[in-house]
């Protein structure tokens, strides 16, 4: 398994500003993922962030709005840019860990973002 | 789109076994069944996964039908702390890129009652 921390745990931001969310894992992992969970909804994948390559974004998510950095094998950041109230969500990072017969993803505690 | 179908909600009495069903009739031969749960607004917690054999760990048991079109997650002695949304997800077990992502459906809200 993996132990994952996120900072900040929650924040309240003003419209038009940007917030950078940090994700730290206690071991080196190749694959990291960023998800969004809007109020009352299930999780939606934003992008996959592999170290040494540019992030791969899912349909409906663009780099200008959600730039991602992956400087090493234990850390990643997600920035929510030019925020609007519609960006109010829980943002979660996860990591992929190779297992005995299949890979498993483990999730961080999430960052609860409220945009006013 | 999610490849699984789960009941939206279930109730269970504390101390009894909770049996959560999942239908995945279009599962392919190289796809695994994964179960996660999410306790109110926390990050999803991995529970268990399997390919075709039944699996058991310290949290739960996973029973997969012989045709692999459905499965059941069993919490043997449910407690109040097991109240959560349970997600059944099918996904290829290994490899990178898009095959690796988890597609979450709406899951089953399990409420354990005292």
Image (cartoon, rainbow, N blue to C red):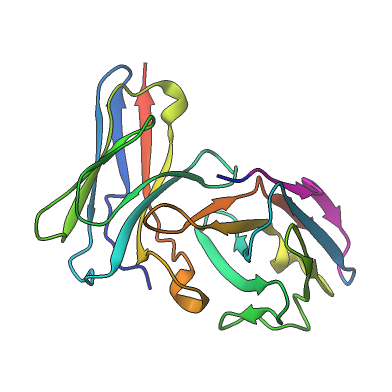
Q: Residue at x 66, y 45 (%)?
A: A109
In the rendered view, would you say A30 is above or below A3? below
Location of residue B10 (image quadrant): top left
Label count reads 0
The residue segment tinted magenta is A3-15
Q: Main SS of the magenta segment?
A: strand
In front here: B108 or B99? B99
Asked whether B81 falls inside the magenta stretch, the response is: no
Which residue is located at x 59 percent, y 55 percent? A39
Quadrant, the N terminus of chain B: bottom left
Question: Looking at the image, which residue is at 56% across and 68% down?
Answer: A45
Q: Position of residue A102 (x, y in %)?
A: 39, 58
Q: Is residue A19 left or right of residue B111?
A: right
What is the x, y in percent for residue B96?
A: 50, 74
For this rendering, which residue is in front, A22 or B108? A22
Q: Is residue A116 visible?
A: no
* Residue drawn at (47%, 25%) of the image: B81
Q: Tell me if B94 is positioned left or right of A47 in this view.
A: left
From the viewer's perspective, tell me whether residue B56 is left or right of residue A89: left
Q: Is residue A7 located in the magenta-colored stretch of the structure? A: yes
The picture places residue B67, in percent across and down from the top left corner, at 10, 60
> Extreme left residue here?
B66
Q: Nearer the viewer, residue A54 or B109?
A: A54
């Amino acid at each position: 398994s993996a132990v994952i921390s996120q900072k900040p745990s929650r924040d309240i931001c003003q419209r038009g500003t940007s917030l950078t969310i940090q994700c730290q894992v206690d071991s080196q992992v190749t694959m990291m993922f960023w998800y969004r969970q809007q109020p009352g909804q299930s999780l939606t994948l934003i992008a996959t962030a592999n170290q040494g390559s540019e992030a791969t974004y899912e349909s409906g998510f663009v780099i200008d709005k959600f730039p991602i950095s992956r400087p090493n094998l234990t850390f990643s950041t997600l920035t929510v840019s030019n925020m609007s109230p519609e960006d109010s969500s829980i943002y979660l990072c996860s990591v992929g860990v190779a297992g005995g017969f299949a890979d498993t993803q483990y999730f961080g505690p999430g960052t609860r973002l409220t945009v006013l | 789109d999610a490849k699984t179908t789960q009941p939206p909600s279930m109730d269970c009495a504390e101390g009894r076994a909770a049996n959560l069903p999942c239908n995945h009739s279009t599962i392919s031969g190289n796809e695994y069944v994964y179960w996660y749960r999410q306790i109110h607004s926390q990050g999803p917690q991995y529970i268990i996964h399997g390919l075709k054999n039944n699996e058991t760990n310290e949290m739960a048991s996973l029973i997969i039908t012989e045709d692999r079109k459905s499965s059941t997650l069993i919490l043997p002695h449910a407690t109040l702390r097991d109240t959560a949304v349970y997600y059944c997800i099918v996904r290829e077990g290994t490899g990178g890129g898009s095959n690796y992502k988890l597609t979450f459906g709406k899951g089953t809200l399990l409420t354990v009652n005292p």
